Amino acid sequence: MSQESEPEYTEGDLRNTGMSLKHERTWDYELDRIVDAVEERDASTVGLQFPEGLKRRAPRVADDLRGILPEDVSVMISGKPCYGACDLDTYMMRRTDVFVHFGHSPMKESEKIIYVPLFSNVEVTPIMEESLSELSGPDEDGESQGDGEAVGRVGLVTTAQHMNKFDEMRSWLEERGYTVETRRGDERLTNEGQVLGCNYASADVDADQILYVGGGKFHPLGLAMEHPDKKVVIADPVNNVVTVADTEKFLKQRYAAVHKAMDAEEWGVIFCTKIGQGRWETAEEIVENNENAYLITMDEVTPDRLTNFGLDAYVNTGCPRITTDDGPQFKQPMLTPQEYRIAIGEEPLENLEFDTFHGTW
Amino acid sequence: MSQESEPEYTEGDLRNTGMSLKHERTWDYELDRIVDAVEERDASTVGLQFPEGLKRRAPRVADDLRGILPEDVSVMISGKPCYGACDLDTYMMRRTDVFVHFGHSPMKESEKIIYVPLFSNVEVTPIMEESLSELSGPDEDGESQGDGEAVGRVGLVTTAQHMNKFDEMRSWLEERGYTVETRRGDERLTNEGQVLGCNYASADVDADQILYVGGGKFHPLGLAMEHPDKKVVIADPVNNVVTVADTEKFLKQRYAAVHKAMDAEEWGVIFCTKIGQGRWETAEEIVENNENAYLITMDEVTPDRLTNFGLDAYVNTGCPRITTDDGPQFKQPMLTPQEYRIAIGEEPLENLEFDTFHGTW
């Protein structure tokens, strides 16, 4: 395996962690796999796609590749924003012989795509040790107790970049007497125990508490929203903090958006053209049943792009994280499909759930 | 023809005029052509694309269309930014039975595309009357005079949105004794006398002075840069002002960008994936001859997208107006391909020309 040997500080992070890095990281770019694919396919073009926080590494990876590939092979870098494995640069994919997507695990396997997940080298057990104070632990004999409540039973989830340490996390908990519940959520997820910013089905396990090991606050917040009956403990090995997910502030923000949108007369309904973010039936259904709704297709959903249309409110059928995390930046209320149904009176407000995304493409 | 009858103020303008509207305008959206195409093709989907300043009209046009089209036809609106006929929403074009591009004249005819140019209804002769004070006029007998200089000879150009009045402009000048020189520049331009923000070949006529009738300042500035030997008089019927194009400030800005880029060690070379903005050979040539240059493919070229890469300077082989008009917003210098050659010492600074774009796709 080709690997960077010198540790160095990076200036960014995968966007979906939501925080800047404070720890050293090195990644294995798996250049050998790329070189093999170039040889096998007699490729003349190689396209590289990185998530936002890793784009700074792209020129270095291109350097390394150009150094070991035949001279007549062109290496190019995608400059389009990229926020997940749902967000492939399909233009580049169609026009290069070898297309490499870095930083995310496969959402759907394809011969066209080499996925290089870029696992973190951050140690996870020190922060897990600290997180135990927030978890209901096992008895000294390691058995459950109480009114059917599984004490010492814990669901375990993490993100793609720490997936390489998932077995270590599980063993570490089991050695301390915990019963660890895990599952692979659905086809959108590559691995058992993996969660995405838009999919927490791996946390749908028989445990009242979930330990999320990973960076950032957005994933565990979505997790807590999706599983309101469970306590979600966050062990963040990147920023070295333990917290418990609190959905109250988030819910208030969503209620405010829904209330504001109740006055809307005209709606823009966004269909996202990114390969893994399309919910066509959802978008179409809204437009068919509301003569004041307009179907708008776009890839990047940004405040500027929407403001130009001058509509009163928007429903985003694409990435739920745009709606919930970036929502306050938009000048008009932007709702999830379910929030839209609440705003027009088709569902009661107390039904409000986190918008999750299932399936691939 | 279906036509909006009531005049109303619009809040924006075609982006390429560079100024906001002050005068009333109505447009003919040519809905009959769209309805005919739906019928002919037995279409079930219609896609509408508008330039930025007209996106606000899109819901109204969709309303009108939905009112006259069969109920099972879906109408959708492109939410992608659009800055010219070079900038078609190809995703929408491929996925709709009828695709309509509003606000620009055809860059290349295609059965897939209905172009609706949206001509301005602003009167042009009042401001042309005022512009005469800046033009060398004809003798009383209407003949040329002087050392071979064609007094009373004037080149005439305008933009797509005033093209409907081009014959009127020409006749008006001829009635006043002018010899009017016009031509159709090259295949990128639909009409005789038409200029684009990236192509001024229609001004390549035998006259020392050019009258530009149209809104904004960017088109005539490019025109003056491209034809430094000619006096360019701007008769702006939208903002009702007459000015003479002055390239000095613009040149200073470009010299500054080139000088700053002379210190660059690493270059990003942008290949734009928009259908009419690709100059592949230009981009490839730079990367092949500079081992510190990296090929980056993208559609929208914005400061944020480039900053992520952390390179020292950029060469934009896509839309020249991004480089020249938006250049100062970028944190690193962004150069045209020729400016790049100057910065690396392959051409002298005094060669600096405006970057124009020829051909279609």
Image (tube, coloured by chain):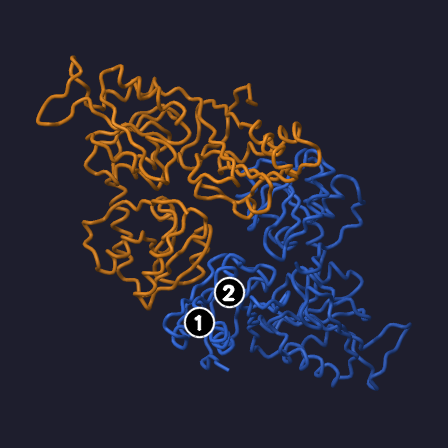
Chain colours: A blue, B orange
Seen at 28% across and 37% down, the residue is B223
Across and down, in percent, residue A355 comes to 71, 54
Q: Using the image as rendered, state which of residue B220 and residue B152 is in the foreground.
A: B152
Q: Provide the residue designation for mark 2.
A: A50
Q: Using the image as rendered, state which of residue B214 and residue B152 is in the foreground.
A: B152
Relative horizontal placement of residue B360, taking residue B229 as reference (left or right): right
Q: Using the image as rendered, state which of residue B73 and residue B54 is in the foreground.
A: B73
Q: Provide the residue designation for mark 1.
A: A61
Relative horizontal placement of residue A105, taking residue B103 as reference (left or right): right
Which of the 4 image quadrants contains residue A59? bottom left
Which of the 4 image quadrants contains residue B195? top left
Q: Is B113 located above or below residue A72 in the figure?
A: above
| Amino acid type, callout 1 | Val
Mark 2: which secondary structure? loop
Across and down, in percent, residue B213 comes to 33, 27
Relative horizontal placement of residue A224, taking residue B165 as reference (left or right): right
Q: Residue furthest right?
A: A147
